[in-house]
């Protein structure tokens, strides 16, 4: 069995009606603190809201996302998901990025072929 050096955390859930974003951010922080390369990959339109800056609500996601980014967690959002809700790149939290469906697919294949950890929260 090979050693896990990377983890890909898949998020597709609604930000305000689910604990999934909290879990994704907590898991990512824990993995990074263990020295594991962590990426949160957001692929659903309601999950894409997580990368939008200046959200209003009970959860302070922007601050938690910044903590993750400061630790070196990569946070990537599928361009299709962002476009469905009309989110533009300049509306995203700095440090998060938009990726194409092809990049998303290639990332899933890469992690699978390398035997790395893929989590769905």
Image (tube, grey):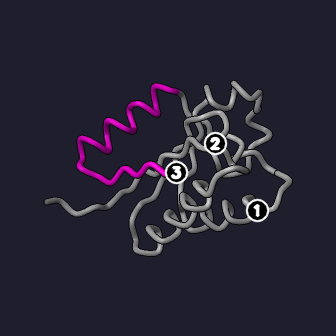
Query: What residue is pinned by disc 3?
Result: 40
Q: Position of residue 37 (x, y in %)?
A: 42, 60
Question: Which one is earlier in the sequence, the residue at label 1 or at label 3?
Answer: 3
Magenta span: predominant SS is helix
N-terminal-most mark, 2 or 1: 2
Name the spot of residue 86 as percent of width and height, x first: 77, 27
Tell me if label 1 and label 3 are in contact, CB under 8 Å: no
At 45% from the left and 58% from the top, the residue drawn is 38
* Quadrant location of the N terminus in the rendered image: bottom left
Q: Secondary structure at mark 3?
A: strand
What is the spatial separation of the Cα atoms under label 2 and label 1, in whole angstroms? 14 Å
Q: Identify the residue shown where x is 63% and y is 30%.
A: 81
- In the displayed structure, 44 sits above or below 56; it is above
Side of 78 relative to 94 (left or right) = left
Q: Mark 1 sits on what residue? A: 59
| Residue interval drawn in magenta | 101-121
Question: Is 66 in the magenta?
Answer: no
Q: Is residue 120 left or right of residue 5?
A: right
Q: Quadrant of residue 84?
A: top right
Label 1, label 3: how far apart the Cα atoms are: 18 Å
Q: Residue at x 52, y 51 (%)?
A: 40
Classed neighbour count for the residue bearing mark 2: other residues with Cα under 10 Å, few (<14), some (14–19), many (≥20): many
Q: CA distance from mark 2 to mark 3?
A: 11 Å
Q: Could you say where residue 51 lies in the image, as x and y percent from the top left?
A: 69, 47
Relative height, residue 109 to residue 34 (above, below) = above
Question: Is residue 114 highlighted in magenta?
Answer: yes
The label on residue 47 is 2
Callout 1 environment at 10 Å: few (<14), some (14 to 19), or many (20+)? few
- Helix, strand or loop under label 2: helix
């Amino acid at each position: 069995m090979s050693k896990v050096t990377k983890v890909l955390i898949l998020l597709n859930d609604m930000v305000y009606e689910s604990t999934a974003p909290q879990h994704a951010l907590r898991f990512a922080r824990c993995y990074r603190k263990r020295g594991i390369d962590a990426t949160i990959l957001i692929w659903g339109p309601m999950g894409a809201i997580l990368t939008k800056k200046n959200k209003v609500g009970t959860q302070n996601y922007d601050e938690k996302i910044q903590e993750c980014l400061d630790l070196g967690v990569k946070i990537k959002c599928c361009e299709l998901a962002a476009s469905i809700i009309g989110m533009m790149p300049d509306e995203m939290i700095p440090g998060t990025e938009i990726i194409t469906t092809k990049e998303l697919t290639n990332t899933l294949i890469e992690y699978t072929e390398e035997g790395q950890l893929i989590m769905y929260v």
